[in-house]
Image: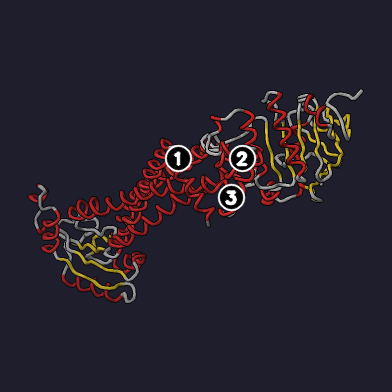
Amino acid sequence: MRRFGLALREVGHGLRRNLTMTIAVILTVAVSLTLFGTGLMVRSQVDAMKDYWYDRVEVSVFLCGKASDPKVCPAGAVTPEQRTQIEASLNGLTGVVENVFYESQQDAYNRFKEQFKNSPILENVTPESMPESFRVKLANPEDFAKVAAAVGTSPGVEQVQDQRKLLEKFFKLLGGLQAIALGIALAMLLVTVLLVVNTMRVAAFSRRKETGIMKLVGASNAYIQLPFVLEAAVAAGVGGLLAVGAIAAEKAYLVDKVLEPSFRFTAFVGWDDTIKIMIVIFLTGIILASVAAFLTVRRYLKV
Amino acid sequence: MIQFEHVSKRYKAQSAPALDDISLEIAEGEFTFLVGPSGSGKSTFLRLLLREEKATSGEVIVNGKDIAKMRSWKVPAFRRGMGAVFQDFRLLPEKTVTQNVAFALEVIGAPKSAVGPAVADALELVGLTEMADRKPGQLSGGEQQRVALARAFVNKPPILIADEPTGNLDPATSLGIMRLLDRINRTGTTVIMATHDAAIVDQMRKRVIELVGGHIIRDEARGVYGYAG
C-alpha cells in the first residue's frame, strides 16, 4: 500500500499548491451543504408539526346559540334534547369516532381568554357570544364526511367544521416555502459541482506535465486520477464538517434556545432527525465532489 | 517485434493523411532512424507506437499484438515496455535528478527497495552520478537529456523511442547523447529515433527510414540522411 501512501502525499501537496481554489471549494461546499441541510431541517420540522397537529385535529360540531344566523338555526339556540340527540348520534358512529368531548360556552370562553390573553379583542367577548360545541376525535382523520353526514343537518347544529382543512392550507403554505428552500439548496449544490469541475480542470491543466510523464512511463489511470479525486473528497469533507457544525448550531441554538421556548404549541425537530441530516449532507458533499472530480479528470487525463 | 501493416492515420481537420498506407517491420535489437521534413509523419509514427493515437486503418503490431485492439486499462502496462525521450526533455523542475528518475519507477508501483539501486544504475549509465542531487534548472541541455534517458531506461524497457532527442543540443553534446543511445541499443534494446540531424545519421550508419508526406520513400539498412550517392 506504499503507492496509496504516495498518492496521499500528493493530495496534501496538490491542495496546498492550489490554496485559493481549495478554500473556494471548501467554502462553497460548506455554504451549499448548510443550505441543503437547512432545507432538510425545515422539512423535518414540518413533518414534526404535521405529526403533532394531525394527532390533535378534531371535527368541531358547533351548536346553535342565541347569536347564530337564523337561516341556519331557525329555532334559535339548541335545546337540551337536541344536544342529547346530537351527542347520541356522534357516539353511535362506532369505528369512526374515537371520542366526543363537549365544550360549553363557558369552556369556549375560557379557552379563548387563554389564547388571546394579551389581545384587546377580549373586551368585546362574553361567554354568551361563544358557541358551544362537540369536539369529535376521529379514528381516521379522513372520515370527516361521515360525521358531517350524520349530524350536519340535525336540528340544533350550526356548523360542522373540519380542522384538518384549516391545517392543510397552512401546511400547503409551509410546503411551498419548503420547496423554495430545497430548490435554492439544489441550485447551490449544482454550483458546487460546477466549481469542483472547474477546479479539477485547472488542477489537471496545471499538473499536465507530471500527469503527462506519468502516462508516458505507464502509471495506471487510477494512480494518476486518484490524487485529484481524493483532493476533491478531502476539500468537500472539510466543507461538509463546517456544514455539519452549522446544522448542529441551528438545532442547538435556533431550534432549542429560540424557537422552542417561544412556540409552546407545537413539536420541534429532534436530535435524531438532526443527526440523520448531518450524515446525509456530509456524505452528499463527499460523493458529489468525488464523482464530479472523477468524471472531470477522466475526461481531461485520458490515456 | 514491431510491425506496421498498411497503417494510415488521418486527423479529422486535415484532408491529407499524416501517414498513408505504411508497412514496415522493425526487428528486436534494431537501431532505426526515422528521417524526413517536418510534417512528414515522423511524430505521428511515434505517437501510434506509444498508442497516444490509434491508426485510422491498418494494424500496428507490437510483440504480436495489434495495439489498437488493446483494452485501455492495459495501455499503462504496455507503455512500461517502452522508454521515450523528447526534444524538450520533459523533466519535473522541482524534483532532483534522482527524484526525476525514481518518479518513473514509483508511479508504476515498483518496490521501494528496488528503486534506489535501479536509479543509481541508470544514473551511472548516463554518467550523471555526480549530479544526482541537482535540479534540472542547474543542468545543461545535454545533461538534462541524459536525465531523461536515465528515466526512460531505468525500467529496462525492450523498446526506446526518441523523438528528436538532439533537437535542442549542440553537435558535440548531441554526439554524447548518440553514444549513449548506441550503448543502450547494444544492451539489446530496440531504438527508434526520429531526427533532423543529418550529421548524426550519416555517422551512425544505421537503418534509415525516410518519410515524406506520410509515405516511406526510402528504407535502407545502413543509410545516411540524404540520398546516398
Residue A239, given in percent of the width and then of the height, sits at 38, 46
Vertical relation: A218 (above or below) A205 = below
Q: Decide: few, some or many residues near mark 2? Use Cα within 10 Å; few <14, some 14-19, many ≥20.
A: some
Q: Is residue A178 above or below residue B8?
A: below
B163 with respect to A11 (left or right): right
Q: Secondary structure at mark 3?
A: helix
Left or right of A292? Residue B221 is right
Q: Residue at x 70, y 32 (%)?
A: B177
**Residue at left offset 11%, top offset 56%:** A113
Q: Amino acid at mark 3?
A: Val
> Does residue A256 appear to the left or right of B218 in the view shown?
left
Residue identifier under label 2? A213
Question: Alpha carbon of mark 3 to alpha carbon of mark 2: how far?
Answer: 17 Å
Does residue B18 appear left or right of residue A60 in this picture?
A: right
Q: Which disc number belongs to residue A191?
A: 1
Crowdedness near tag 1: few (<14), some (14–19) or many (≥20) residues, C-alpha within 10 Å = some
Closer to the chain start, of discs 2 and 1, is 1
Q: Which mark is residue B115?
A: 3
Amino acid type, residue under disc 2 in the picture: Ile
